[in-house]
Image (spheres, rainbow, N blue to C red):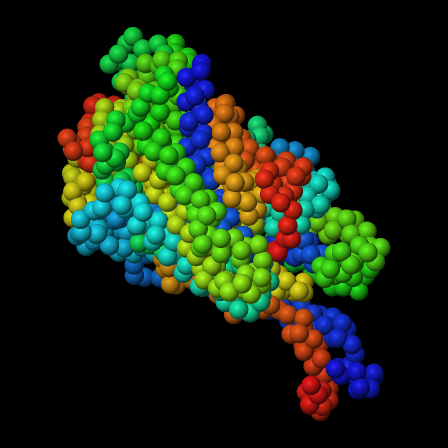
Amino acid sequence: MIDNGLLVQMLMGALLGLSVYLPLAAGQLSLATPAFYAVGGTLAALLSTRWSALGATANGGFPVPSLLLEMALGGVLAGLLALLVGRLVLRLQGIYLAIATIALVEIVRVAILNLPFTGGAVGIFAIPQPFDTAAGYLLPALALLALAGWLCQRLELMPLGRAMAAIRHDELAASCMGLDTTQVKLTAFVLSAMLAGSTGALAAHFLNTWNARQGSFDTSITTLAFVVLGGSRTWLGPVVGGLLLTALPELLRPVGDVRLVLFGLVILLGPVLAPQGLVTPALLERLGGWSLRSGASRKTENAQP
Amino acid sequence: MTTSSPPSTAGSSGPIERQQRGALRLAALLAAGIGVLAWLGRSSDPAAKPLPAGPLTLGAAIAFTGNANLYGQDQRMGLALAERWAQQTGAPARPVRLQLEDGASDEPSAIAAFNLLIRQGVIALIGPTLSQQAFAADPIAQRQGVPVVAPSNTAKGIPEIGHFISRVSAQSSVIAPLSIEEALRRDPSIRRVAVFYAQDDAYSTAEVAIFQKALAARGLNPITVQRTQLADNDFQTPITSALQLKPQLVVLSVQAVAGGNLIRQLRELGYRGQIVVGNGLNTPNIYPICQRWCDGILIAQAYSPELNTPINRRFQQLFGQAHGDRPPPQITAQAFAAYQVLFEAIQRLQRKGGLTGVTLGQARANLMSELLSGTYATPLGPIGFSPEGEVRQDRFYVAEVRMAPGGRDGRFALVRELQLQENQP
Amino acid sequence: MIETLLQLLLNGAASGGVYALVALGYTLVFSVLGVINFAQGALFSVGGYLTFLLMGGKIGVNGALPGWGLPGGLPFWLALLVAAAGSGLVGLLVERVAFAPLRRRNAEPLLALITSLGAGVVVVNLLQLLMGAEGYAFPHGTDALGGLPGALMIAGARIRTIQLLLLLTSAGAVLALSLWLERSKGGRALRAVAEDATTAQLLGINSEAMVRLAFFLSGALAGLGGGLIGVSVSLPGPYFGIGYGLKGLAVLVLGGLGSVPGAIAGGLLMGLAEALVPSAASGWRDALAFAILFAVLLLRPSGLLGRRTVEKV
C-alpha cells in the first residue's frame, strides 16, 4: 500500500511539521517553513546541476557525500536568511507574525520564479540522483528526522527549551523574569529554517526537479495542519501529523474523485474532534507511566484521582 | 498525582520524566512502524516476473484535481473515447485495459501516481498532465524501464529524459510560426506588432520565444512585449499600454481561459487589427469566454477538427456521441492519440511474438522499441517518433475562428494545411 | 499621457474595490471573533458560480450534471444579489461547522485557521465536482447590462463598462456597509460585540447572533466580489477565488486588522499600486502586495489605519 517513495514523502512531511513546531514551541506562529524549504531546494538544484565539482556523473548519478553537503548548505543558507528576516519579523506577534511569514513565502516564491538563473516557470530539471531507488532516500530522511527528534527531545530538558516553553506560556512574564526573549525566539526560528532548508535540499533530489511551485501558501497551511492535527504540545505531534496527513490523500485514492473533499473534511473535523491533536502530553505521560514489570502498580495509580 | 509511590519504581517519577519516557517509547514505536512500512513497501516492481496472459494494463496518471484539472478533464475524455474506439475495432490480438489514476497538479502526486501504477504492473504509462510534473515523474519510469507517452507535455527536454520517454504533443517551435506567416500573407503591410505572453507559464514562455524568432525572421521587431501572469484575467492595464503604440498585429501566447479574456478585452478596448494566438487556445473552451469577439483570430494547430481522414471522422463521431455536437479540443485528440499509438504498438508486438514468453520488464522494453519504430494514422494526422521519442508530426494547420451569429458557438475553420518536409526534433 | 494615467487609475481602483470587498469580509469576522476565516477565498468562488447558475448558465460537459441549469434566468443584478445572499448562507454554514464547535470548547484560536481552511478545501473541491474545471462565461456577457457599450470614454480614457460598474458596485456595497455599521441598531450591536463581547452581553446584545450576522455579511461580500469578477473576466475555474482570498488577506493587514476604513483604503492602495507596475516587471507584481505588507508590518504593525489592540491568535 505504502511504497518507499510515499514513505520518503511522509518523512519529509514529518520534517516540515517539526519545522513549523519549533517556533510554535516558543509561542510564535510562523508559516515561513515553505520559504526556507524552497530556498534549500533551489540551492541544491542549482548546485547539483551547475557545479560539476560536486561530482554529478554523465548518466545522472550523484555522490552521497555531496548530497549531505548540500543538505548542510541548504540548512545554513536558510538559517542565515532566517537570522536576517527573524530580527525583523519576530517583533510581531500572533496573527501579524503569521501573515508576515506568509508574505515572506510569497516573496520568495515570486523571486524564484523571476530570478534569471532558476529556470523560470519550468524550473530546474534533470537533478542527478544519489540513489537508484526511492528506498535510498529513506536513510538520509530518517537520519535527519532522528537528529531533529533527538534535538527536540533534549530541548525539553535544556535551558533553551525551558525558555521557549516559558515564552509560549506567557511572553511578558518570561521577559520580566529576565529572559532574553528575542534571542530565544530567534534561535527557535533559525533552527526551524535550517531544518526546512535541509529538507528542501533532500526533496530537490527526490523530486528530480525543482520549481517555484514547491514552496507556496498552500504548503504553509498544510504544514500547519500537520502540527495542529498531530498535536502542537509535543514534538511527536507534528511528526505523527506529518506522516499521516502526507499519506492520507494517497490512501484515499480508492474513493476516486471525492478524495480531496474527504481530505478537506479530515482537516476540518480533526481539530473539532481532537482540539489537542492526536499526540498530547497526557498521552505521552500515560505511555511513559506504563510499567513494563507488572500491572499491579498501574492499578494503584489509576485508583488515585 | 502519583508522587506518593516509592521513587525507585519505573512508573512513578514526575510528569516531565514520564512524558519524556513516553515520548521515547512512542518514538521507538514510530521508528518500528516506519521500519515495517519500509520493509513492506520495498521495491516490488514486478518487472522480473513473467508477463501474465490476458489483457495488458495501460496506466494513465492525469490531473483530476487541482488547477491542471482544466486539461486533465479534457484528457480523460480523449482516453475514454480511445478505449471505446479500441473496443470497436474488432477483436484485438491482445486486449488492453486502462487504469486511471489522479496525477493531480503537483509534482509529489505525479510521482506517487507513477509509482503506484508501475507497482501494479502496467505495461506503459500515459501522462502526466503538466511538463513540470513530467520532469519529476518521468525519471522514475525511465529508471524502471517503463514506456511513457506524454499526451500534453510540450516543454523542451521531455524526450531527452531518457529512452523510455516519448510524447505525441508537438513542441510549439514547430507549430507557432505558421499562423504568423498567414497573418502577414493577409496583410503584408504589417510593421507594428504587439506581443503578450504569460511569463510564469512554461508553455507560453517557450512559445513566445518562437513567435519572436518567426517575427524577427521577417524583419519585424515587436513594438511592445507585455508580460502577464498565469492567473491573470484582467488585462486592461497591459492592453492600455500596448494600444497606445497603435499595433497592426497582436500576437498572444497564454492559456485558454486567459486568452479568451485577453481577446475580448482587446476588442472591447477598441483594437480592430488581426490577432494571432498560440496553440494553447486550440480548444472550443474559449468560445464561451470571448464569444463574438473570438471571430477572425488566427491559430496554428497541431490538431484540426476539420481534418478529413477516416480516423478523425471516427474520433469526431465518438466525441459527438459522448459530448454533443461540438469540436473536440486539441488536448483531447492528443490524449486519444497517446492511447492509440500504445494500443497499435501492442497489437503489432503481439503479432510479432514480442509479448510471449517474456518478463514484464522485457515486454516493456520491447514495447518501447516497437512504439518508436511505427507510424500511426491518428486524429492529429500521420505521426511517428524520432529515436529519442520526440513526436514526428509533419502536418500542421492554420485555422481561423468563425463564430456563429449568436456568438455562443463557433468553429476552427481550416485555412491552410501545411506539410513540413523534415521535422527536427 | 493624462488619459493613460486616468485609465490606469480607474483600472486600479476597480480591482482595488474588489480587494476591499474581500478584505472587509475578513474584517467583519476578525473584529467579532479575532480570527481569520481562511474559507473566504472559496466563498468568493461560490459567489461567482452561483451568479452564473442564477443567470441561467448551464453546467459544462465535465460537471456532475452536464447541460443542467436552473430553469429561466434572473437578470444580472438580481442574480448577483441572490448569489451574494447564497454565499452568505454558505458562510453561515462554515461558521457552524468550522468555528462554532471550537468556540464552544474554548479551543485555541489557531485551530480555526485550520478548520476554516479545511472548509475551503471542501467547498472548492465540491464546486469542481459539480461544475468541472472549465472556464465559464456569463450567459449574456456584458449585453445583460442593459445594452451598454463594451467600453466608455471618460475624459479621453477608454475603460471597459463592466470595470466601471464593478467599481461603482463595490463602492456602493462598501459605503452601505459602513453606514449600516455606523448608524443602524444592528450595526452598532455588531460593533459593540467587536469592542468587548462580555460588556455587550451585559448590555443584552446576543453576541452569538452577531457572530452569525458577521459571517453572513462576510460571505455575502465575498460572493458579491466573486459575481462581479465573474461577469468581468468570466470564471476561470473553481480555484479562482483563492488568489483573491490571499490578496484580501494582505489588504486586511495593510489597512489594519479589524478596521473598516483601513480595509477600504488598503484595497484601493493595493489595486492602484498593482496597476502602476510596468509590464516589464509584472512578474514581480504578486510580490508587490506582500512586499508592501511586509514593509507596513515592520514600520507600523497595526496597519495603516488600525489601532493597537490585543491579538487573539
Furthest residue toward top: B189
Toward the viewer: A5 or C224? C224
Return the x and y of residue B220 as percentages of the image width and height.
38, 11
Residue A147, image quadrant: bottom right
Specify whether residue B66 is in view: no
Residue C134, image quadrant: top left
Return the x and y of residue B188 as percentages of the image width and height.
28, 9
Toward the viewer: B424 or B347? B424
Looking at the picture, does residue A115 appear above or below residue C19?
A: above
Q: Residue at 77% x, 48% y: name it.
A: A182
Q: Residue at 67% x, 63% y: name it.
A: A235
Specify whether residue B184 is in view: yes
Count of numbered tags: 0
Q: Quadrant of the C terminus of chain A?
A: bottom right
Q: Is residue A258 left or right of residue B379?
A: right
Q: Residue at 78% x, 52% y: name it.
A: A181
Looking at the picture, does residue C80 appear above or below residue B250?
A: below
Residue B309, image quadrant: top left
Looking at the picture, does residue A168 appear above or below residue C279?
A: below
Q: Is residue A186 left or right of residue B188?
A: right
Q: Residue at 45% x, 20% y: name it.
A: C5
Return the x and y of residue C14 as percentages of the image width and height.
41, 32
Return the x and y of residue A67 as percentages of the image width and height.
66, 45
Toward the viewer: C142 or B208? C142
Q: Is residue A165 left or right of residue C296?
A: right
